[in-house]
């Protein structure tokens, strides 16, 4: 079933995340904030590893018309740069709901969630800038006076 396959995929993803630090890399896992993934024993254990953390954000704070609460788990320090939550009314009073279908730019009928699948440009820029700052500090330390 889909649930069984989803659980297998989640466990494989968690196993890969565990080996990344030993290989010198970073890992990150993104899923809706309401996902059951966050309460699985494997994910809870992964988030208890040294340096791991969860960063919650709402995609409306990065320029989308929908709130889309999202969690990123990672051990990369630069993911904390995207921790932004919706300020609510009056600035964010009417979010578009990601339910049902709509017409895509090409005229086809698609699920609203599929149009919201791409990460907003501002989110990508913010995360990239966070990585660049981290890399600059790590690989080009400030000269000592």
Image (tube, rainbow, N blue to C red):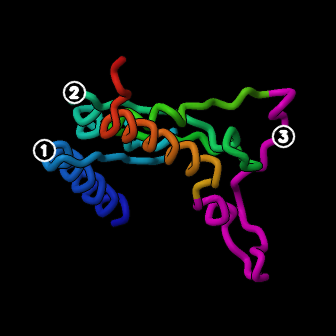
Q: What element does badge 2 sit on? A: loop
Q: Quadrant of the N terminus?
A: bottom left
**Snapshot quadrant of residue 37:** top left
Residue 76 sits inside the magenta stretch: no
Q: Which mark is residue 94?
A: 3
Report whether 100 appears left or right of 38: right
Residue neighbourhood size for the residue with mark 2, other residues' Cα within 10 Å, grouped as few (<14), some (14–19), many (≥20): few
Name the outermost residue toward the left.
22
Q: Residue at x 64, y 59 (%)?
A: 116
Q: Which residues are magenta?
A: 89-118
**Snapshot quadrant of residue 117:** bottom right
Q: Residue at x 78, y 49 (%)?
A: 96
Q: Which mark is residue 141?
A: none
Question: Residue 35, how many percent across, how many down?
Answer: 46, 44
Q: Which mark is residue 22?
A: 1
Asked if the residue at tag 3 contacts the one at tag 2, i.e. Cβ–Cβ closer than 8 Å, the answer is no
Q: Please report whichever mark, 3 or 1, sits nearer to the chain's N-terminal start.
A: 1
Q: Quadrant of the C terminus?
A: top left
């Amino acid at each position: 079933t889909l649930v069984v396959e989803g659980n297998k995929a989640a466990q494989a993803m968690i196993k890969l995340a565990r080996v990344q630090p030993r290989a010198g890399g970073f890992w990150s896992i993104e899923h809706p904030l309401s996902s059951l993934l966050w309460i699985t024993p494997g994910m809870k254990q992964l988030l208890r590893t040294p340096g791991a953390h969860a960063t919650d954000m709402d995609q409306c704070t990065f320029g989308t018309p929908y709130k889309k609460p999202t969690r990123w788990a990672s051990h990369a320090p630069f993911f904390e740069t995207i921790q932004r939550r919706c300020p609510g009314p009056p600035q964010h009073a009417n979010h578009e709901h990601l339910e049902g279908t709509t017409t895509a730019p090409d005229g086809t009928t698609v699920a609203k969630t599929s149009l919201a699948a791409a990460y907003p440009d501002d989110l990508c820029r913010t995360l990239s800038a966070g990585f660049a700052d981290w890399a600059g500090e790590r690989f080009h330390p400030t000269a000592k006076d």
